[in-house]
Amino acid sequence: MNNKKLSPWLWTSALAVYAFLYIPLIIVIVYSFNDSRLNAEWVGFTLKWYQVLFNDGPMLHAAGNSLLIALVTSAAATLFGTMAGYAMYKFKLRLLPLLVLTPLALPEILMGVSLLIFFVMLNMTLGMVSITLAHISFCIGFVAIVVRSRLAGMDESLVEAARDLGATQWQAFRLITLPLIMPGVIAGALMAFTLSIDDFVITFFTAGAGASTLPLQIYSMIKIAVTPEVNAISSLLMALTLALIMAASKLAPGVFKAN
C-alpha cells in the first residue's frame, strides 16, 4: 500500500471539482424551500412549493409518464442488454460490439433525428410508445457494457465444472452464470432507469404533440422562469436517484465497491 501523503494541490483540485459538481445541486435543494417566487434572494423557509407541486396536475401526469416509460425501458433494456452483453462475451464477433455500442457513441441529437425519421417512415404515431422504443434503443448498449464487464471478471471454471457434472448449457447459465453476473444486471437496470427518466433530447424528437414527460414539462416551465416549483421537482428527482443508488449498493455491493 502506498502510504505517501497526497499533495495539497491534489486535495485543492479535488475539492474544487467536487464543489463545482455539488454546490449547484445543493443550491437547487435549498432554494426549493425559499419563500419567494423569484430565486434572486433567500426570503424565508417554506414547504408551500412542494404543496404546489403535488397539486400540479400536468406536472404529476408528466412524472407518471416518465416513471412508466423508465420502468418499461429498464425492464426491456435489461433483458436485451444482458443478452447482448453475454453474446459479446461468448462469441468473438467483430460486428456485434459495433452494432450494440454504436448508439452510445452517436450524438443524442443525431439519435433523436434518426429515430424520428424512422418512426415517420413506419407511419407510427408519436407518443408514449415511440418514446419508450427510443429509450430502449439507446439504453441496451449501456446495460450490455456493464454485463460484459461483469462476465469478464467471472470465473469460467465454475461453468465448466457444472457442465462436467451434467448440467445443460441453459442450466449452467441459469444456476451459475446468472447469479454471478446479477450485480451487473442490477447495475445495468439502474443505469437504464436513470438514463430514461431524465432524458430530454431524444424524448423531445420522439414525443409528438400529445405526450409529455417530466424533462419536457420542466423545460416548458423554465422557458418562462426558474420557479421554486422547478427546484422542488428537481430535488425530488435527486432524492429518487440517491435512493436507487443506495438500494443497488445493498443488492449488489460488488458493483459499487472500489477495488
Image (tube, rainbow, N blue to C red):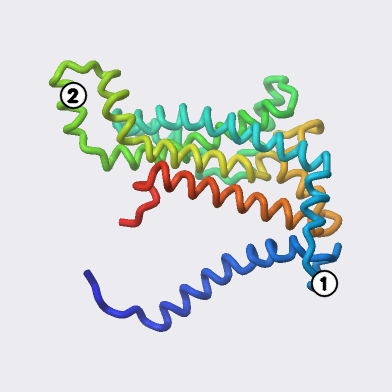
Question: Closer to us: mark 1 or mark 2?
Answer: 1
- Numbered marks: total: 2
Q: Position of residue 200 (x, y in %)?
A: 68, 45
Task: Look at the numbered discs 1 and 2 and tell me whether their residues touch, using CB distance below 8 Å.
Answer: no
State the residue at coordinates (80%, 73%).
41
Q: Amino acid at mark 1?
A: Val
Dot 1, how many residues are within 10 Å of its Cα: few (below 14), some (14-19), or many (20+)? some
Q: Decide if residue 112 is on the left or right side of residue 168.
A: right
Q: Position of residue 42 (x, y in %)?
A: 79, 72
State the residue at coordinates (77%, 49%).
219
- Viewport quadrant of the N terminus: bottom left
Q: Hey, which residue is sitting farthest bottom in the picture?
A: 8
Q: Which residue is mark 2?
A: 162
| Closer to us: 73 or 136 | 73
- Viewport quadrant of the C terminus: bottom left
State the residue at coordinates (75%, 23%).
125
Which element is circle 2 on?
A: helix
Q: Decide if residue 78 is on the left or right side of residue 183.
A: right
Which element is circle 1 on?
A: loop
Q: Is residue 200 above or below residue 32?
A: above
Specify the quadrant of the image occupied by residue 210: top right
| Closer to us: 244 or 258 | 244
State the residue at coordinates (19%, 31%).
158
